[in-house]
Image (tube, grey):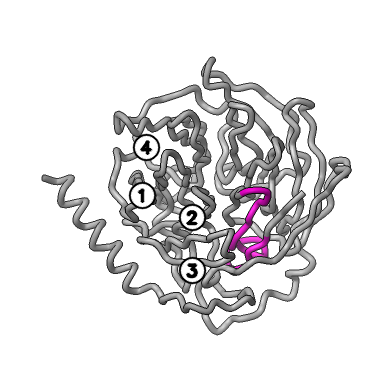
Amino acid sequence: MIESARRRTLLKAALAALAAAPALSRAQSTDAVIMHVRDASITRLPANAEAQKSIDSAAPRAAQPGHWNARAPLPFARSEMASAAAWNGRMHVVGGYGNLRVDRAYHHVYDAAKNAWSEAAPLPRGASHVGVAAANGMLYAIGGFIEQNKLPHEDAFAFDIAKGEWRMIAPLPRARAAACVVALNGKIHVIAGASGRDIKKSIDWHEVYDPAADRWETRAPLPDPRDHAGAAVLNGSIHLIGGGFDGSNRNTGLHHAYDPKTDAWELRAPLPTARNGHATAVLREKMFVIGGESSGKVHGQIEGYDAKADRWESYAPLPTPRHGAGAVTIGNAVYFAGGAPVAGTSFLTSVNEAFTL
């Protein structure tokens, strides 16, 4: 009975969020916009924005560095989604900051073939730093912050992509946000992140959701706790890279790989540019780490990892350095949408750029 009431409350909140969201026009502008997270009257980036940009990498330059192209921007500026997921040629971006709030339930879908955005059913519970992954026609949204960078929640949801409907699934055993969420062998791994009501504490937790049983299980913890890290599946292993400690600007380049067969982590070559709030995607059997932030810097570096050689190389940097954005691979390109164009969480952008080799 209590669970049913909770579900009804979340459904009402989702419907209210959808009603409050501005409708998308049929003809979307091709120009990206900048917004302040709290003050609509501020329309320009701070004077030191250009000086914050960092694009230099200590990694050797790749023989084929690739290039970036501008694509249709998000319908409006958004940031701190934490991640995005792709299914059937479309990128799903959920939650985050936008339109003067930090607990949005927005759910935008980008069709790469059409280079166009649409709205989908909103998250049942608005939040930022939501972890997402897609598997077997379902989009999973796990945890997130209810307030600005604090108060994580434990709710978890599954979105039936074909039906366009959300439903609640078994909640996280422990509330968290800014976690790494990846799909592997039909199960959803939720690793690391931040916990704590008012003071963020980096965690090493590793929990796995089994959709068939609607149940969570515990796996080997990450050797070093951190939040705002990046993760991707490469050659059957989960690679978790970089991140920050306890919500501070103390960043790391640590890189661990998890083998699901042995339930064990192994240290790999560190990320050349330590950072947090970056995105991770796999393209042509290489794993790419894109964007991010560190103390007073917003990163445009894109560094690619070759698992066979255990080696990093640098690639063409982001035209628009940013952090807190979502990245996915669709076809032969990585799409990187939204984010914060300066260090910190004061500004948002709708920029969407695509990387190809």
Q: Hey, what amino acid is under mark 3?
A: Gly
Query: Which residue is at 41% across, 47% downward?
Result: 141
Q: Residue 350 carries which label?
A: none
Horizontal side, residue 130 vs residue 317: left or right:
left
Compare residues 214 and 56 and report the one nearer the observer. Answer: 214
Q: Do the residues labelled 2 and 3 touch (CB within 8 Å)?
A: no
Compare marks 3 and 4 and give the one earlier in the sequence: 3
Indicate whether 152 appears above or below 337: above
Indicate whether 270 appears above or below 52: above
**Residue position for label 4:** 174
**Residue position for label 1:** 159
**Residue position for label 2:** 92
Compare marks 1 and 4 and give the one earlier in the sequence: 1
Span colored in magenta: 331-353
Q: Are marks 4 and 2 in contact (CB under 8 Å)?
A: no
Assess whether residue 7 is covered by the magenta stretch: no
Residue 192 coordinates in the image, percent (x, y): 51, 36
Q: Cα distance, mark 2 to mark 1?
A: 11 Å
Horizontal side, residue 326 vs residue 106: left or right:
right
Task: Name the element at disc 2.
Answer: strand
Task: Name the element at disc 4.
Answer: loop
Q: Hey, what amino acid is under mark 2?
A: His
**Residue position for label 3:** 98
